Image (tube, helix red, strand yellow):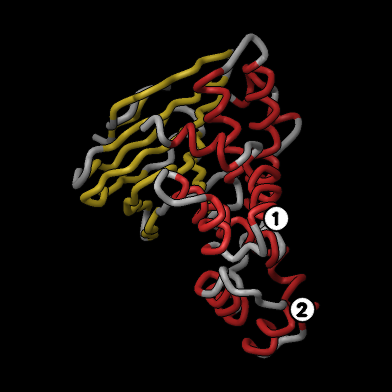
Amino acid sequence: MTARLRTGRFFGETLRRNRSDGITVSEVRFSGGIRIPAHSHERPIVNFVLAGAYTEIWGTERRECLPAETLFHPAGGIHSERFSPAGARCLTVEFDPPKLRLEDQVTMPEGHLVFPRGHWTWISSRLMRELRAGDELSPLVVEGLLLVLLTGVARQGTGSSAPPDFLRRARTLLHDRFTEPLQIAEVAAQVGVHPSSLARAFQRHYRCTPGEFVRGLRVELAGRRLAHPEISIASIARETGFSDQSHFSRTFKRVTGMTPGAFRAIVSEN
């Protein structure tokens, strides 16, 4: 029989948890090399990969889950996981749509969804901040962030058509060269389409612009590098493709809601 986990229950170690009416936010650590059998959750769940890596399987689909990735599972959606030797650390948000009246505002997808890496980094960072140092207003902040997130989940859930080959090639190119000063015209030329066609298709299928996708990848890499206090912030700015430290700091704060220094202080706790 497939296990159905109650709210707040995981196969990993729960490091922190915050419950409010209809929402449970948990930071969970999974040991290296473990295999989690097929299971489901009693509520819809959004999972942010904070660190480490694992393979997730649902139905015939298989996904390599890496840092800065965001996944959505519907209530009762069956999936299993295989964790890398280093294990992983995740931030999970479980929610009750009727209690929060979310179904009056967004339509919940019926299947599993995966977002482009880095797309929701700013929300996971804000949720972590509320989880670790929240106050009496934290439940209101978390509910607002959840609504923004689920609006994006619902929109992606309506786009069921597969991206065309040129778009997948463009996304791969951006992912491989995101620290370089690429122009959309250059990417479009390499995949054989007009720049405006590329921009429209990217927005329709990935729910962000090519520039936002690249920005998310740069911030995600910067977040991993900030976990190493011996590396200066100026060096990280250069390594991740920003023109200077000031530009990097402004962008990082706009995406994550905190400065590189503040983010470093949080990740250094672990």
**Which one is nearer the viewer's eye here, 50 or 12?**
50
Give the quadrant of the N terminus.
top left
Residue nearest the observer in this picture, 153 or 86: 86
**Label 2 SS:** helix
Q: Is residue 130 left or right of residue 183?
A: left
Q: Residue at x 60, y 56 (%)?
A: 216
- Residue 161 lies, in percent from the top left, at 62, 66
**Alpha carbon distance from label 2 to label 1:** 29 Å
Discs 2, 1 touching: Cβ within 8 Å: no
Residue found at x 54% / y 74%: 177
Q: Which mark is residue 247?
A: 1
Location of the C terminus by quadrant is top left
On screen, 118 above or below 102?
below
Give coordinates of residue 68: x percent, y percent: 49, 49
Residue type at mark 2 is Ser
Nearest the camera: 186 or 30? 186
Tell me if mark 1 has few (under 14), some (14-19) or many (20+) residues whose alpha carbon lies within 10 angstroms of its own. few
Which residue: 51% across, 30% down?
Answer: 93
Which label is found at residue 197? 2
Please state which amino acid type lies under the numbered disc 1: His
Q: Residues within 10 Å of mark 2 (few under 14, many from 20)?
A: few
